Image: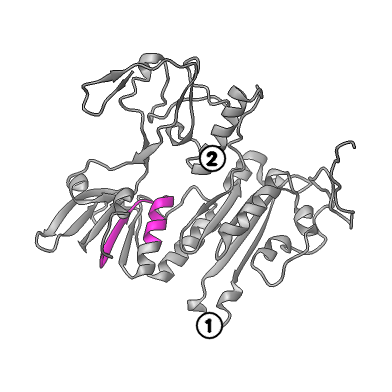
């Protein structure tokens, strides 16, 4: 049953399949003054003037992206994180590199704060705010305070439990690998499920669900593993696969091999001072005797564009030898990913159905019979 916005009319719809894809919304904490005197990431797009001083609260994608944008535009930018740094769930080398670059760019990072305790008005005429943190720090004179500590699923008001749709403790809808909920013929996908909360991920899940329900592909499903993703931080981050801690936990420290590189992009070659040169950090994580590439992590100029292509290679099971077999495109930053390590030290084992190693001829298409 669907109620009108004024609550006066009710419409009943009967359907064979029901899909819940209501997404999520910014989480705004309830500490004193927070809901009254701050804005969310949605409110950021309604700003009509560049704030002179801004406080961004959060440690995830949205927080570092907004902090980077505002700092680059000229705002004095404070980033408040609960623990030691932002993007803690990313590979440690990448989050550390971002931390270094943000500080170099002038972003003021408040660490180990345990969150916001209170937001109050400094001056009613100017509207500046004071942000008091749990650890005792105080930030004064903020023109805008942006709360970006996370997102919540839009599940309230749907009577999901009344029809047998189970939620997890955080309020996200529980689904299996085929997007089935605990109720027959009710499906859910996207941010409302809390798994890989990215728009392209939801689109892919929707396409596979449509294939299964309407395209005769009874086993169609999407994979939530090895999903390439980008953070539009300053500089940009591109990543796919396991972080180093995850790889160690999955395969054991003795079964992984790490390749690293850190350099200044050629774009910055005209600058004399190293302080002006934003560094690019790249990391390949391989596992097993065949050195299967299980993680690719990049922070630096062009990371977003290059990750789409390398994401295909990882999804197809490329090994370090496969990466090495690709001829480098010079001069680019991306060539570093296919030239890492001492040449010839990786075992000559390919993950491809058609091996590209040792000068093998290219694959041939399968042609239809004439």
Q: Residue at x 54, y 40 (%)?
A: 201
**Residue 81 percent coordinates (x, y):** 36, 53
Quadrant of the rendered image containing residue 65: bottom left
Quadrant of the rendered image containing residue 46: bottom left
Q: Which residue is mark 2?
A: 201
Does residue 353 show up magenta in the picture? no
Say left or right for 229 vs 335. Answer: left
Asked whether residue 294 is in view, the answer is no
Say left or right for 153 vs 340. Answer: left
What numbered label is drawn on residue 20?
A: none
Measured Cα–Cα span from mark 2 to mark 1: 39 Å
Q: Residue at x 13, y 64 (%)?
A: 126
Asked whether residue 268 is in view, the answer is yes
Name the quarter where the N terminus is drawn: top left
Does residue 67 show up magenta in the picture? yes
The 10 Å Cα crowd at callout 1, few under 14, some 14 to 19, many 20 or more, is few
Q: Single out the residue that lies furthest toward the bottom.
A: 272
Q: Secondary structure at mark 2?
A: helix
Q: Residue at x 89, y 36 (%)?
A: 369
Image height of 178 relative to 317, above or below: above
Q: Residue at x 79, y 54 (%)?
A: 321
**Residue 220 percent coordinates (x, y):** 64, 27
The one nearer the camera, 168 or 113, is 168
Sequence-earlier tag: 2 or 1: 2
The 10 Å Cα crowd at callout 2, few under 14, some 14 to 19, many 20 or more, is many
**Residue 158 percent coordinates (x, y):** 34, 23
Name the quarter where the C terminus is drawn: top right
Q: Which residue is mark 1?
A: 271
Q: Which residues are magenta?
A: 51-68
């Amino acid at each position: 049953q669907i109620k009108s916005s004024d609550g006066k009319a009710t419409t009943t719809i009967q359907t064979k399949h029901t899909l819940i894809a209501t997404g999520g919304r910014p989480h705004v904490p309830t500490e004193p003054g927070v809901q009254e005197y701050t804005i969310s990431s949605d409110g950021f797009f309604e700003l009509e003037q560049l704030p002179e001083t801004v406080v961004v609260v959060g440690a995830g994608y949205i927080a570092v992206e907004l902090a980077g944008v505002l700092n680059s535009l000229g705002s004095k930018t404070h980033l408040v994180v609960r623990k030691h740094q932002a993007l803690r769930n990313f590979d440690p080398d990448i989050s550390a590199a971002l931390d270094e670059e943000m500080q170099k760019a002038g972003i003021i990072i408040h660490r180990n704060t345990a969150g916001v305790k209170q937001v109050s008005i400094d001056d009613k005429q100017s509207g500046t705010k004071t942000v008091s943190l749990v650890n005792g720090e105080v930030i004064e004179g903020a023109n805008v305070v942006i709360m970006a500590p996370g997102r919540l699923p839009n599940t309230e008001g749907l009577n999901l439990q009344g029809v047998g749709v189970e939620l997890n403790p955080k309020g996200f809808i529980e689904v299996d690998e085929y997007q089935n909920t605990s109720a027959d013929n009710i499906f859910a996908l996207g941010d409302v499920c809390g798994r890989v909360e990215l728009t392209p991920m939801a689109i892919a899940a929707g396409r596979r669900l449509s294939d299964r329900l309407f395209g005769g592909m009874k086993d169609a499903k999407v994979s939530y593993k090895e999903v390439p993703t980008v953070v539009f931080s300053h500089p940009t981050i591109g990543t796919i696969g396991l972080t180093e801690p995850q790889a160690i936990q999955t395969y054991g420290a003795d079964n992984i091999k790490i390749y690293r590189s850190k350099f200044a992009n050629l774009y910055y070659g005209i600058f004399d001072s190293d302080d002006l040169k934003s560094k690019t950090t790249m990391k390949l994580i391989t596992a097993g005797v065949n050195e299967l590439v299980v993680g690719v992590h990049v922070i630096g100029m062009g990371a977003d564009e290059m990750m789409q292509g390398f994401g295909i290679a990882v999804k197809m099971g490329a090994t370090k030898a496969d990466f090495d077999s690709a001829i480098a495109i010079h001069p680019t930053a991306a060539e570093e990913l296919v030239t890492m390590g001492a040449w010839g030290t990786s075992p000559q084992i390919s993950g491809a159905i058609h091996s590209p190693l040792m000068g093998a001829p290219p694959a041939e298409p399968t042609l239809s019979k004439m």
